[in-house]
Image (tube, rainbow, N blue to C red):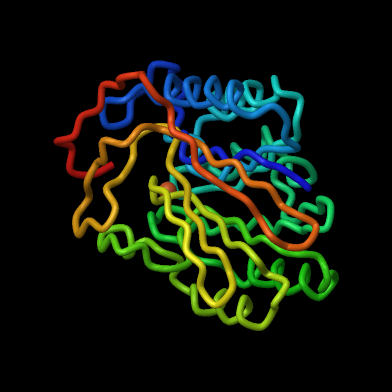
């Protein structure tokens, strides 16, 4: 069994006191990692699923990497719409933290870049679709998880669903054709969802800072706490997973803001 911790949508700034919707994003991440250390005794690696920085600064990526490194576990990153891919790569190179395919136990994890530079919505360029196809062609027996920043299926939030992966049909077609794809995992939506669709788990994870209101037509900030996800990948292709949110800490969140 392999176990990982998913950290997503940290929205860190070059300035450690930087705030998103009134909330100090660094202190959100600090509190989430503190709680994780109390709850999780052992794990194998971290997955960091985009919008790791709000301003795309090299300093924010450096700080995140060294903070996570303190656990002595590998960390793997994909970019989100707020990230600066070149700056990420300068800290997390493609042959290490930003590698597209991770082999772990009886599983392979395919890390996809759904970023469209300058846009909020997601899309998978032909090169990303090729990464999926080639990894599945090279290894058709490992249980497979697909990881990306943007949601590949609608969330039921109209404003967020305008931002989903535009060519999600291409990805869903590949998923239908490969029974060894067991899990699809993403960030971006700042909320916890876990659905089983035609035998495949489709899972989203809360942000380490502010949360978005589920099933909302317009942008809305939820009063739920920041959190992380743990997931166990078993040799028989099954998984166990849950989200844990921090408790007993009040963050100063501005609920009146109409966008981010
Ligand atoms: Fe995002």
Where residue 28 sits: x, y (%)? 42, 25
At 75% across and 37% down in the image, what residue appears?
A: 44
Where residue 74 sits: x, y (%)? 75, 35
Left or right for 225, reference 64: left
Q: Would residue 172 be visible to someone looking at this image? A: yes
Above or below 207: residue 116: below
At 64% across and 28% down in the image, what residue appears?
A: 65
Above or below 218: residue 35: above
Q: Quadrant of the C terminus?
A: top left
Above or below 105: residue 4: above
Where residue 16 sits: x, y (%)? 45, 17
Left or right for 207, reference 200: left
Left or right for 205, reference 135: left
Above or below 64: residue 170: below
Q: Would residue 55 be visible to someone looking at this image? A: no
**Most extreme residue toward the left, as rendered?**
256
At 14% across and 36% down in the image, what residue appears?
A: 256
Depth check: give the residue in front, 206 or 259: 206
State how many labels appear: 0
Where residue 64 sits: x, y (%)? 58, 27
Q: Quadrant of residue 226?
A: top left
Q: Quadrant of residue 119?
A: bottom left
At 26% across and 35% down in the image, what residue appears?
A: 223
């Amino acid at each position: 069994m392999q176990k990982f911790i998913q950290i997503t949508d940290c929205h860190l700034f070059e300035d450690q006191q930087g705030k998103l919707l009134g909330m100090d994003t660094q202190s959100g991440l600090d509190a989430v990692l503190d709680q994780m250390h109390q709850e999780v005794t052992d794990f194998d690696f971290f997955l960091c699923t985009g919008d790791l920085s709000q301003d795309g600064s090299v300093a924010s990526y450096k700080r995140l990497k060294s903070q996570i490194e303190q656990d002595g576990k590998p960390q793997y990153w994909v970019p989100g719409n707020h990230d600066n891919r070149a700056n990420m790569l300068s800290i997390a190179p493609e042959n290490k933290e930003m590698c597209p395919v991770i082999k772990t136990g009886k599983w392979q994890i395919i890390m996809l870049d759904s970023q469209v530079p300058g846009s909020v919505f997601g899309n998978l360029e032909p090169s990303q679709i090729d990464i999926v196809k080639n990894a599945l062609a090279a290894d058709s027996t490992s249980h497979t998880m697909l990881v990306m920043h943007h949601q590949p299926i609608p969330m039921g939030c109209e404003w967020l669903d305008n931002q989903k992966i535009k060519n999600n049909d291409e990805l869903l077609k590949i998923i239908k054709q490969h029974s060894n794809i067991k899990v699809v995992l993403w960030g971006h939506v700042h909320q916890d969802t876990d659905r089983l669709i035609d035998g495949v788990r489709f899972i989203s994870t809360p942000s380490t800072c502010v949360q978005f209101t589920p099933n909302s037509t317009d942008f809305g900030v939820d009063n739920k706490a920041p959190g992380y996800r743990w997931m166990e990948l078993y040799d028989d292709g099954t998984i166990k997973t849950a989200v844990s949110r921090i408790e007993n800490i009040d963050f100063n969140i501005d609920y009146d803001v109409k966008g981010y």
